[in-house]
């Protein structure tokens, strides 16, 4: 059977005119869904439920988890800093949901792929920190917000030997697109950096003790149709999700009936 992949959407709590205005609105670019569907998975767009028991129940229906990118930034308070630059902030409902799902996915060995802002969420969930704005905080860096369309690659990355990313790509370097102004500063506990840009910016992170737990700073969903190396990323993720044994339902608590 095709693996069911939970896909996280963005969320407008009612304060973004470009995402539904005053009406709370879910928002997701179709390219994420298309990549999963066209390469053999069943995408399931997740509601950002607040109840933790509901989150655990949702997780039991999934074979894999895809944390998508985000226009706004995580609140710097989540990694112990004050906000230094005037960029929009991710809705608290989405941030809470995704940060919790990272921990639940880790504990349940759920194959997880995180893209761009999703990778930053993955890092913060493990106690890592972020550059709030690369151009303002790091000298001599590449242009990480490319001016050409994201269907084109713009710079290379070096892949750390022996990592999951290395086993998937099977090359020491590859070309990626780039559409971000934030990035990992301090890598989270238990995570490792598995790729860097020529300027030293972290481009991928992963959990070496997890079967498939990978964060990518670039957007392979723009590239998988024309670039085989980026297609491999989704294929490897879906293979891992296909192999994962189904989670058993939690036993009823004492004093309850079924």
Image (cartoon, helix red, strand yellow):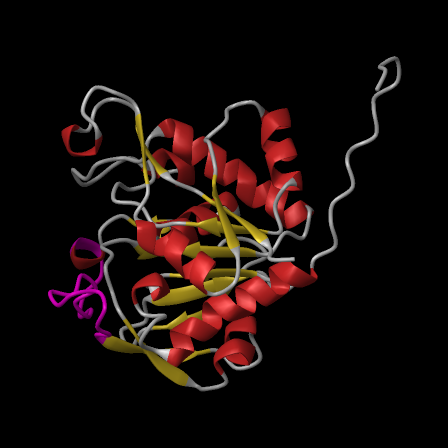
- The relative height of residue 174 versus residue 183 in the rendered view (above or below) is below
Question: Which quadrant of the structure image shows residue 196?
Answer: bottom left
**Chain part drawn in magenta:** 136-154
Which residue is at 40% across, 28% downward? 93
In the displayed image of the protein, which residue is found farthest to the left?
A: 147
Residue 69 vs 152, above or below: the answer is above
Residue 194 position, x and y percent, is 47, 71
Along the line of sight, which residue is nearer the eye, 256 or 197?
A: 256
Q: Which quadrant of the view contains residue 251? A: top right
- Quadrant placement of the C terminus: top right
Q: Main secondary structure of the magenta part?
A: loop
- Kindly tell me whether residue 210 is visible in this rendering: no
Q: Residue at 15% across / 28% down in the picture? A: 17
Q: Which residue shows up at 16% across the image and 37% down it?
A: 86
Q: Is residue 207 magenta?
A: no
Viewer can see residue 130? yes
Q: 109 left or right of 161?
A: right
> Which quadrant of the figure contains the N terminus?
bottom right
**Placement of 61 over or under 209, stated as above or below:** above
Q: Position of residue 12 (x, y in %)?
A: 28, 29
In the displayed orientation, state which residue is furthest to the top.
Answer: 255
């Amino acid at each position: 059977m095709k693996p069911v992949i939970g896909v996280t959407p963005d969320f407008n709590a009612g304060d973004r005119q470009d995402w539904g205005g005053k009406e709370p609105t879910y928002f997701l670019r179709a390219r994420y869904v298309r990549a999963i569907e066209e390469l053999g998975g069943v995408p399931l767009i997740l509601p950002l439920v607040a109840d933790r028991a509901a989150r655990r129940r949702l997780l039991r229906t999934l074979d894999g988890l895809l944390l998508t990118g985000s226009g706004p930034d995580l609140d710097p308070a989540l990694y112990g800093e004050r906000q230094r630059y005037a960029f929009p902030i991710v809705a608290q409902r989405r941030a809470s949901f995704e940060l919790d799902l990272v921990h639940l996915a880790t504990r349940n060995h759920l194959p997880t792929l995180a893209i761009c802002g999703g990778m930053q969420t993955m890092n913060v969930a493990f106690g890592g920190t972020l550059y709030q704005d690369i151009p303002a905080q790091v000298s001599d860096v590449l242009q990480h917000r490319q001016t050409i369309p994201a269907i084109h690659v713009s710079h290379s990355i070096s892949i750390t030997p022996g990592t999951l990313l290395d086993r998937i790509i099977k090359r020491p370097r590859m070309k990626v697109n780039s559409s971000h102004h934030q990035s990992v500063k301090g890598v989270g506990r238990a995570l490792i950096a598995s790729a860097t840009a020529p300027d030293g910016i972290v481009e991928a992170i992963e959990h070496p003790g997890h079967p498939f737990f990978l964060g990518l700073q670039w957007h392979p969903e723009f590239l998988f149709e024309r670039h085989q190396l980026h297609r491999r990323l989704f294929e490897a993720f879906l293979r891992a999700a296909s192999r994962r044994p189904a989670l058993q339902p939690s036993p009823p608590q004492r004093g309850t009936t079924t």
